[in-house]
């Protein structure tokens, strides 16, 4: 990959770097959710259980840059659970490489629809822009999802020409109940 950038499967020993990135970037809800899900993921692995989630880290010249996750648990829907690049390394193209990589994996795994979370506040500006650039559409909004005045935007794109409408309705109903 470009400029010594590599993407490899996340290992349990990567968690401190991943958690420190999460701490600096995610909102209160996503911080807790991401850490719990990642801990559960590695615990499940120890017991030989496959939770259906996959996580990768990006390194530039052996130095941790960021991570991305893909969940593929509901019907034919892939869900990019989290993507993050260390604040001081943002804007250099790493986020785009990580997202493109996860999109390729979703396609390989036969996902028909791919979803990713965004938000209405300025903190999601870069993420929203990136999703749009890579072909996601931001049609679905859940008002006041994160907090009052802080809406969830569910971006999605079809990876397969089949009608995705039912998949999206399913996701909205089962994954995103208003908190
Ligand atoms: C979203 C995120 C992963 C993007 O990573 P990144 O490495 O900064 O992104 P890139 O450098 O690859 O830029 C990709 C695109 O993002 C958008 N972008 C990047 N910096 C931007 C900025 N300052 N303002 C607006 N858009 C921006 C652009 O569309 C850019 O494409 P371009 O370079 O062709 O214009 C990163 O900003 C991040 O970690 N944000 C905090 C965590 C988060 O919100 N995650 C998403 C929800 S889980």
Image: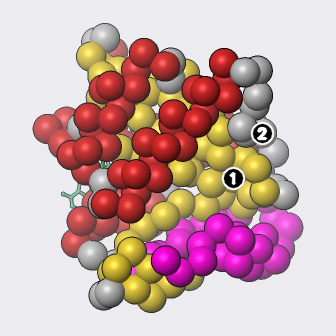
Marks 2,1: beta carbons within 8 A: yes
SS class, disc 2? loop
Q: Is residue 148 left or right of residue 105?
A: left
SS class, disc 1? strand
Return the x and y of residue 11 as percentages of the image width and height: 50, 18
Q: Which residue is mark 2?
A: 109
Number of residues whose C-alpha sits closer than 10 Å to that of mark 2, classed few (under 14), some (14–19) or many (20 or more): few
* Residue at the spot 30% in from the left edge and 26% down from the top edge: 17
Q: Which residue is mark 1?
A: 78
Residues under labels 2 and 1: Cα distance? 9 Å
Can you tell me whether the CB of the residue at mark 1 lies under 8 Å from the nearest atom of ligand 1? Answer: no
Please tell me how many numbered marks the rendered image carries.
Answer: 2
Q: Is residue 83 above or below residue 67?
A: below
Sequence-earlier tag: 2 or 1? 1
- Can the viewer see residue 2? no
* Residue at the spot 41% in from the left edge and 35% down from the top edge: 67
Image mark for residue 88: none
Would you say residue 158 sits in the magenta stretch? yes
Q: Is residue 36 above or below residue 78?
A: above
Q: Quadrant of residue 176?
A: bottom right
Would you say residue 99 sits in the magenta stretch? no
Return the x and y of residue 164 as percentages of the image width and height: 78, 72
Return the x and y of residue 9 as percentages of the image width and height: 55, 21
Name the residue nearer the viewer: 141 or 49: 49
Q: Is residue 89 above or below residue 25?
A: above
Q: Is residue 39 left or right of residue 119?
A: right
Considering every residue shown, the one lying at the far left of the view is 88
Q: Quadrant of residue 161?
A: bottom right
In the picture, the quarter occupied by the N terminus is top left
* Residue at the spot 58% in from the left edge and 36% down from the top edge: 40
Residues shaded magenta: 151-179
What colouring style does the render use?
A: secondary structure
């Amino acid at each position: 990959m470009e400029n010594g950038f590599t993407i490899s499967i996340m290992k349990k020993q990567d968690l401190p770097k991943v958690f420190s990135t999460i701490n600096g970037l995610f909102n209160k809800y996503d911080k807790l959710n991401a850490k719990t899900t990642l801990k559960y993921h590695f615990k499940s692995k120890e017991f030989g259980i496959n939770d259906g989630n996959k996580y990768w880290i990006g390194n530039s010249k052996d130095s941790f840059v960021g991570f991305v996750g893909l969940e593929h648990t509901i019907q034919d829907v892939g869900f990019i659970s989290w993507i993050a690049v260390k604040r001081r390394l943002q804007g250099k193209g790493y986020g785009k490489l990580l997202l493109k990589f996860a999109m390729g994996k979703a396609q390989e795994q036969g996902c028909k629809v791919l979803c990713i979370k965004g938000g209405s506040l300025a903190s999601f500006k870069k993420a929203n822009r990136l999703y749009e650039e890579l072909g996601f559409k931001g049609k679905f909004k859940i008002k006041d999802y994160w907090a009052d005045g802080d809406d969830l935007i569910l971006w999605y794109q079809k990876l397969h020409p089949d009608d995705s409408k039912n998949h999206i309705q399913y996701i909205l109903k089962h994954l995103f109940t208003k908190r």
